[in-house]
Amino acid sequence: MKYQHGPLAALFCALVLAACSGPAELNGHDITGVMPALQYELINEQDRTVEAGAHAGTIRLMFFGYTHCPDICPITLGRIKAALSAFPPEERSAFRVLFVSVDPQRDTPERLREYTAYFGEQVIGMTGSQAQLQALSRRYRVTYGYGDKNESGFYEVSHSGGVFVFDREGRARLLFNQSIGPQAMAHDLRTLL
Amino acid sequence: MKPTGLEALLPWEPLWPLIAVFAGALLVYLRGLWRRRRPGDLPGAAAFLTGLAGMYVVMQTRFDYYAQYMFFVHRFQHLVLHHAGPFLVALSMPSAVLAAGAPNALKKVCRRVAALAVFRWGYRLLQQPVIAGLLFVGLIYFWLLPAVHFDAMLSARNYWIMNLSMAADGLLFWWFMFDPRPPGATPVTRSVGLRILVLWAVMPPQIALGAWIALSDEVIFDVYAVCGRAWPLSPIVDQQIGGLITWIPAAMMSVLATLVLLRLYFRQVRGQASGSPRTTTKVTG
C-alpha cells in the first residue's frame, strides 16, 4: 500500500506546498535554500580584485546593471536608497548594495565610483572580466546581453531586474522584483537585521 | 552570450549522468539495429532517433540556455520533452531492438528491477488510466503555477527536477498510449477505446491553460524579467507565444495520437480476424 500511494501522496504534498509557498509576511520572494550563498570575484571601484568575504557580516543587496542604463538601474538604485533611508544610521550601516556592472567596456572603476556616489555610501560598484561576470551571472541564473551600437556608439544592455539579498552569513534570502516599493523593501530587509 | 560555432552544441549546464543515459540508449539501440539487420526496423529507428535527439538537444545544448531565459523557448522545450520526443520514442516501439542490443549484464539488471514488487506496483499505479491522465496534465499545471515556476527557474536543482519529471512522465504516458500488445496482454495494456478517452480527456485542460496564458493581459511569469531575457523581446509577446505553444501543438498531439491508435486498433482487429481459429456458425432450424 505504501508504494502504491507514494507518487500520489508526493504529488499532493507538492501541490499543497506550492499553494502555501512564500511566507505571507514577506513582500519579496523568499529564496532561502533556493539559490547558492554569495560568492564572487570581481573588480571594485578601486580597480582591485574583491571577493565576497570583503563585506562579510553585512546584509548585501546585489543588483546587476550598467551605468548607461536609462531606466531600470537608476530607478532600482533610487528605490533601494529610499528603502535604506527608512533605517536609522546605525542600522543602515549593516547594509551594502553591490551594484555589479555587466558592461565592463564602458564602466571603468572610476566611472562606477562617480555613479554609485549618487545613491548613497552603502552602494559599492563592481565589475569584472567577461569570464568573472558570466561565472557570477550563471551562479545566480541571470543573464545579460548587448544590443547593437547606434550611430553615436551607444548600445543597450539587457540585464536582470532583480535585487538579490544575502544575510550577514552570505546566505541567499530574498529576491525583489521590479514591482516592489521602498516601504515594502524596507519591511523585508528589517527581518534580516 | 551568443554561442560561437561548437559552443552551440555543447551543454549549457552539463548533466553527465543524463548524457550517459542518452549515450547508453543510443548505443544499445544502434547495436540492436545492427544485430537484427531488418529493413522493417528502419521507420521505427527514424522515429526513435529523432525523438531521442530532440529530447537531448533541448536539454543538453545551448538551446537550454534560451529555454532558461525566454518563456516561449521554455514552453517549446517542454513540448519536446513531454509531448513530441517521448511520442516518437514510444511510437517507434523500440523494445525489441533495445532488447537485441542490450548486453546480457544490462538485461539481467533490467529483469531484476522489473521483478521488484515496488517497481511492478509503482509502474502499474502510474499506468492506471485515470492516474496517467491526471499526472500528464497535472505536471504541466504544477510547473506553471507562478510561484512554483519562479522557484524552478531560479534553482538549478528544481529546474532539472522539472525537466526530468516532464521527460519521464512523457515517456510513461506515450508508452501507455502506444503499447502495441493486445488489450489485457499485461495489467497495464488497455483497450484502444479507453486510451483514446484518456487522450481526449487531457486535451481540454491543456487548451484552457494555454489560452489563459496566451490571452492574459498581464505578465504572469515575472521570473524572466528578474533573470533577464536572452534577447530583447516584449514580455507580453514572449508570454503570448509561450501560451500558444502550450495551447495548440500540445493539444494537437492528442489528435495525432488518436490517428495512430485507430491504426493500431484496425491492425488488432485484422490480426484477430486472421489469427483466431475459424468459427462456424451453427445454423439450426
Image: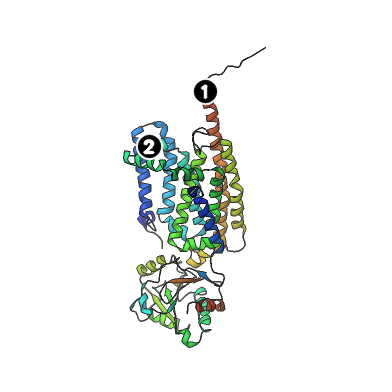
The single residue placed furthest to the right in the displayed view is B285
* Viewer-proximal residue among B16 and B245: B16
How many residues crowd mark 1 within 10 Å: few (<14), some (14–19), many (20+)?
A: few
In the displayed structure image, the side of residue A105 where residue B225 appears, left or right: right
Position of the C terminus of chain B, as image quadrant, is top right
**Residue placed under numbered mark 1 in the picture:** B274
Amino acid type for the residue under numbered disc 2? Ala
Question: How far across and how far down the image is residue B81, in percent?
Answer: 47, 50
Indicate the quadrant where residue A146 lies.
bottom left
Q: Chain of mark 1?
A: B
* Viewer can see residue B80: no
| Residue in front for this viewpoint, A104 or B93 | B93
Could you say whether the residue bearing mark 1 is in a helix, strand or loop?
helix
Position of residue B206 measured from the top left corner of the image (x, y, whole percent): 58, 50
For label 2, the residue is: B99
Residue B28, horizontal then vertical, whole percent? 35, 41
**Residue depicted at x 36% and y 69%:** A132
**For numbered disc 2, what is the local secondary structure?**
helix
